[in-house]
Image (spheres, grey):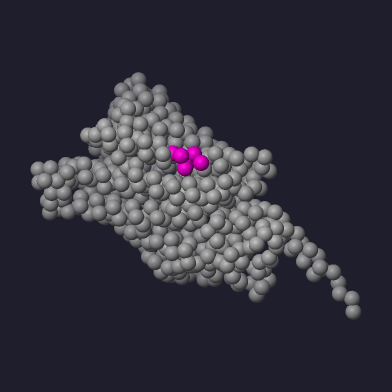
Amino acid sequence: MSSNTIVTLPDQSTAKMPKLSYLNKEHGILSWLLTGDHKRIAILYLVSLTFFFFIGGSLAGLIRLELLTPQTSLMAADTYNKIFTMHGVIMVFFFLVPSVPATLGNFLIPMMLGAKDLALPKINLLSWYLYIIGGSLAIYTMASGGVDTGWTFTTPLSTHYVNTNVLSTGVAVFIAGFSSIFTGLNFIVTIHRMRAPGMTWFRLPLFVWAHYAASVLMVLGTPVVAIAIVLVALERTIGIGVFDPTKGGDPLLFQHLFWFYSHPAVYIMILPGMGVISEVISTFSRKRVFGYTAVAFSSVAIAIFGFFVWAHHMYIMGLSNYAALLFSLLTMLVAVPSAIKIFNWAFTLYKGSITFETPMLYAFGFMGLFTIGGLTGVFLGTSGSDIHLTETYFIVAHFHFVMVGGMLMAFLSGIHFWGPKMTGRMYPEKLSQLAAVVTFIGFNFTFFPQFVLGMLGMPRRYAAYPPEFQVLNVFSTAGATVLGVGYLLPVLYLVWSLKYGEIAGDNPWQATGLEWQTQSPPLTENFVATPIMDHDAYDYEWLEKQNLAKQNQQKASEVPSVG
């Protein structure tokens, strides 16, 4: 079929009597807690994730306040250990990993495919309950004394040398892991089996491609870290010799198991965010994504290479020179598909009709922060420089530029892009643009000084440090204050907009995806009639012809009949 051929989609607004949206069908709390609607489950995740984000963010604030002075002043050293451990556990396992897939992925993938729901709606609800159970156990652990192993549960510290709540924290992460597995499995089945007529693989939005690749990582990688946590629990409780060398175990085995999952977990977090950026950049430059096929396959390539680079976290742990050389090479190779995305987004912008709405500002922020994070990752993937920089604040800065800066910018970009579709209301544009700028400035002000601190040799995970590092730590804490304002503002105005925001309309951004062909907020079953995908992804000429046809149809209906 030619890309210029017009096949009119079923009119989602007039095909039948309009149905109630997913927000209006029922109002009881029980109807939400027992729902099978993917959109309601996405909202449940969004509220839960926001709660855990501010818990983890509050712990980060305590860390920065402690580091204002060279010596411990706000808390004891062991309390500081527990604070940064729980900060890492909550932010990684209960916010960063599920953030985009559990919220935007849950809400949008069925609509992008033209489906009524995910393939396994009951499993979808179960995944949220598992997430809540795991998160509640993590909060209980924090309230009952916390854990001080670091979020990586390094052995033999986690198996022998601490008496804090290692077991309950491990169980919390274990349960949350099954939530990720079920979500990934649901996405894979849905993408394979529930695409609308005409929705071929190469008409899929890049958002769907990114989630497909991330889902494969979830399903294949998460069981490995679950096994590692179970083995830690068994060694800690009944003394089996898995990691203990005095009993025939290998202390490095845990590192291999943990990082075999935890480096692909970086891509579980960032790939869905990359999918968001593809959608936003295409929409606000009014162009098809440059090199669509290359960007789609780069998501798959990232997922594949992600399983072969875990040992670059282990250069200082006795890894052989030959193994270090191999993993350095593989780490460089995994940067190639990420660079493909950055360059293709840049070429998409070239000669595009660019506008600077809030989602686009967050997308630009993602590109800047992720690029800095990726370039600094080269230093850490190379064994010679990594040996100097590992266990310093350079690691902290790099991780946060990639995961917190990059992923959170993508998450906020997506929330602002699809928020009007989710709620049917617009938010105040000027205030949201200000929040995007404040967040970008605050983030750089917070974490860029930490690159310098790491280069100078300041170790991470210590409450005290030499006095010559204080000035840069004061800058970092001041930046964290600005960053906190940048993160708080969207919560305030997005909640405000639920009642007072302007009516959004079905397609406020004039985007091309099927999710924009239904009403805002969407119908309970997404579409009145099954849509037909008769155009390529990001075909704006098709959209203009559809709008023109609708205008002509409306004008014809307004002409008075003669008779």
The quadrant of the rendering that contains the N terminus is bottom right
Number of disc labels: 0
Identified at 33% across, 59% down, the residue is 178
Measured as percent of width and height from the top left, residue 364 is found at 56, 40
The quadrant of the rendering that contains the C terminus is bottom right
Name of the residue lying farthest toward the right: 563
Q: Main secondary structure of the magenta part?
A: helix
- Quick check: 91 left or right of 418? left
- Looking at the image, the residue that sits furthest to the bottom is 563
Residue 541 % position (x, y): 70, 54
Camera-side residue of 131 and 112 = 112
**Which quadrant would residue 467 be assigned to in this image?**
top left
Which residue extends farthest left?
246
Region in magenta: 335-340
Q: Is residue 336 magenta?
A: yes
Residue 343 in view of the camera: yes
Residue 438 in the image, given as x and y percentages of width and height:
54, 37
117 over 466 or under it: above or below: below
Residue 115 relative to residue 67: left or right: right
Write the residue at 38% across / 45% down. Answer: 306
Q: Is residue 532 magenta?
A: no
Residue lying at 40% horizontally and 36% vertically, measured from the top left: 332
The percent position of residue 211, horizontal first and vertical second, equals 46, 54
